[in-house]
Image (cartoon, helix red, strand yellow):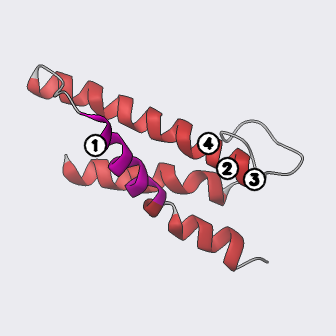
Amino acid sequence: MFWLIIISSLFLANIPWMTNSFFLIFKPIKKGFFLIFAELIIFYFLIGGFFMLIEKENIGNIHKQEWEFYVITFCLFIVFSFPGFIYKVIWKK
């Protein structure tokens, strides 16, 4: 289960950087940093909600977390998106 969380988080964190479309559906004129950051925030909440549901199904309840947990996991999600950032910004074609 742990590896499923890590791999799916890595995948979702890099989607905004790897594609030029917004949520893989809408094609923007130019996808800037703020649009990519908005996608990262929404994907963070999407993956967090999905794994909260899995936690509830497996354990039976969701453990209460304070704000520090969410700040740390969001920072980790940003770190997971670093390969996509390198691909899009540093290695421009």
Residue on which the image places disc 2: 36
Q: Which mark is residue 14?
A: none
Q: Residues within 10 Å of mark 3 (few under 14, many from 20)?
A: some
Label 1: state its secondary structure. helix
Q: Answer with left or right where residue 66 lies relative to residue 42.
A: left
Mark 2 or mark 1, earlier in chain: 2
- The alpha-carbon separation of the residues under discs 3 and 1 comes to 31 Å
Residue on which the image places disc 4: 39
- The alpha-carbon separation of the residues under discs 4 and 3 comes to 12 Å
Label 2: state its secondary structure. helix
Mark 4 or mark 1, earlier in chain: 4
Query: The C terminus appears in which quarter of the rendering?
Result: bottom right
Residue on which the image places disc 1: 69
Label 4: state its secondary structure. helix
- The alpha-carbon separation of the residues under discs 2 and 1 comes to 23 Å
Kind of residue at disc 1 = Phe
Q: Are marks 2 and 1 in contact (CB under 8 Å)?
A: no
Q: Is residue 73 magenta?
A: yes
Q: Position of residue 44 (x, y in %)?
A: 46, 41
Q: Are marks 4 and 3 in contact (CB under 8 Å)?
A: no
Kind of residue at disc 3 = Asn
